Structures are given as structure tokens and as C-alpha cells.
Image (spheres, rainbow, N blue to C red):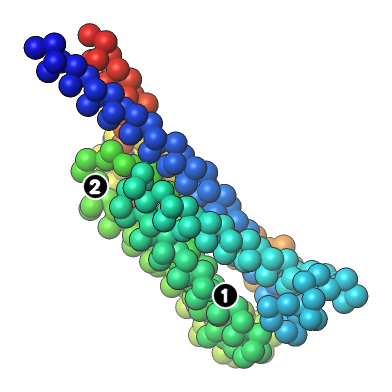
Amino acid sequence: MNLIYYAKYIDSFDLINSQLYKSKYLTIFKRLGSHSVLALIALIVIGGATRVMEAGLACPDWPLCYGSFLPFNHMNLRVFLEWFHRLDAFLVGILILLKFVLSIIWKNEIPNWLPKSYSLLLFLVILQGSFGALTVINLLDSYTVTGHLLIAFLLLITTISINQNLENVEIEEPLIWWRLFLFVPLLLTLIQSFIGVRLSSTWSAHICLSFNKQCLILNTHKLFAFPIAFSILMIIATAIYKRILLTENWKYLSAIILLFLSQIALGVLSLKTNLNEPIFIIGHQLNASLFIAILTTLIFRNPFTKKGLNHSINSQMVGLNS
């Protein structure tokens, strides 16, 4: 009996060590993931500022700028924006490459899906870099610029989904219907962002406001606010009906409402000022990024409070001690 008990003790001890070992590496990936999200949001916002300030071709070559890594002799606001945008993109690429390499090195100590997910991220960042080069080569072609932004949003969504899956290692039954419900405003927002980039990259907004021509894109962009608003109201109503969803997710749901209202306000201010105030347009882009980030977090997070790994390990330790 003592031998059996000892064997069980050793097995349980090895399990605890394994969980602690994995927890150590997963913590590193979570921290890197958080930095990646911040860097991607900054990348999207700086890219929007570069577009608004008409600095997309401030550096005529790629990947360097005027043939150097740091073009001191040509530095001005537009060159700085384009140069900083590329620098942030480079840092994002290095960060994702680091996560991919670490996931290969530690593949025996982390979930099997993690290296595959980081390989997808690496592919997206390579694709993003390729579109960045094409925006310069194709002289800011509208479809290329639009694709460049949408891939950035896909990078953000994928990174957040990986981060949330790392948090939800012990989740038992995710609410699929709740995820699908939240996916509707996310998809609509991505479509509206696509229209928004087309609006700015084809100068349709300026032409419409100045000459009342080519207003279809602008009107479509404005009208898309209605189905997004309706989908958000349905989500809030469902959360109120299912009280536990509101209780567990009220911070995120409140942030979505505030961001949506401020997004409308910034859009109206941009039009009222005839798109002559970059701060409103850049804020509009920042809001869109945060809105997508929070929606994605809601989709992939555990909608209910769960017991963490530390609680699980402590329970096992109590069982062993008893």
C-alpha cells in the first residue's frame, strides 16, 4: 500500500511540476502577446496618420528610406511618419518571429496548437510586409492600401484570439452562439473599415464634400453605422436578458458602447471640418482599432469567471497533503 501511495504521490508531483513548467512558458507568451496587441494598434494608428498626412510616399524606396535606415538628411514630419510606421512594422515582425521561434523551441512544454497559430501569425506579417512594399511600388494604389489595413486588422484579431485561448486553457464549454452573435458587429466593422479606407484612398470623401460628386462610398460608409448599432443593441439586450453575461462582461460591453458613440462623434466632426483636422481622422482610426480589439476579446474570452491554474495547483497540493 505504501508503494502504491508513493507512486501516486510521485505521479501527482510530476503533474504539478509539469503544470508549473508550462505555466512559466505560457506566461512569457501571454506577455509577448500583450505587447504584440499594443504594437499592432500603434501600427494601425500610425498607418492612419501616415495616410491622413499624405506621407505614404514620403520615403520613395523600400524597405529603407532614402537608402538608409535613419534618413537624417531628409527628415521632416511626413518622412518621420512613414519611417516610424515602417520601424513599428519591423518591430511587430520581430516580435512575432520571436514568438514563433520560442514556440518551436518549447513545443514539448506548450499546447500543440500554439506553434501552428504562431506560424499563421508569421505568414500574415510576411504578407503584411509584402503589401507594405506594394503600396510604395504601386504608388498608393487604393486596393493595395485597403488590403494593407485589412491584413493589419487580421493580425490584431489573430493575436488577441491566441492570447485569449492562452487564458482559457481550462475552459470547458464555450458559448458558441454568444461568439457568433458577437462576430456579426466585428464582421460589419471590418467591412465598414474597408469602405473607409477606399473612401480616403480614392479621395471620394473630398470630392463628395467639395463637389457633391462620387458620394456613394461616403454614404455607404455612413449607412453602415446603422446595422452595427443594431447588432450592438441586440448584444446588450441579450446580455441583460442573460444576467450572468452582463455581470461577467459589463466592462467590455460598456467599452463597446462608449467606443461606438465616440466613433460616430469623431466621424461627424471629421465631416463637419471637411476632413481638414487630422486629429479627428486619426482618432477615428484609433477608435476603430480599439473597437475591433475589444469585440475580438469578447468573442474569444471565457464569458464566465473561471478558476485559474494556480487554484488548480493549490487544490492538488491540498489533496496531496491530506
Residue 135: x %, y % from top left:
62, 83
* Residue found at the far left of this picture: 1
**Mark 2 neighbour class, 10 Å CA radius: few under 14, some 14 to 19, many 20 or more:** some
Q: Residue at x 45, y 64 (%)?
A: 121
Residue corresponding to mark 1: 129
Q: Quadrant of residue 229?
A: bottom left
Q: Residue at x 44, y 36 (%)?
A: 24
Q: Quadrant of residue 317?
A: top left
Residue corresponding to mark 2: 175
Decide which of 165, 18 is in the foreground and name it: 18
Is residue 270 in view from this perspective? no
Which three-letter amino acid code belongs to the residue tagged 1? Answer: Gly
* Residue found at the far top of this picture: 322
Q: Residue at x 47, y 52 (%)?
A: 102
Using the numbered discs, state the Cα–Cα distance from disc 1 to disc 2 in whole angstroms.
Answer: 35 Å
* Residue found at the far front of this picture: 3
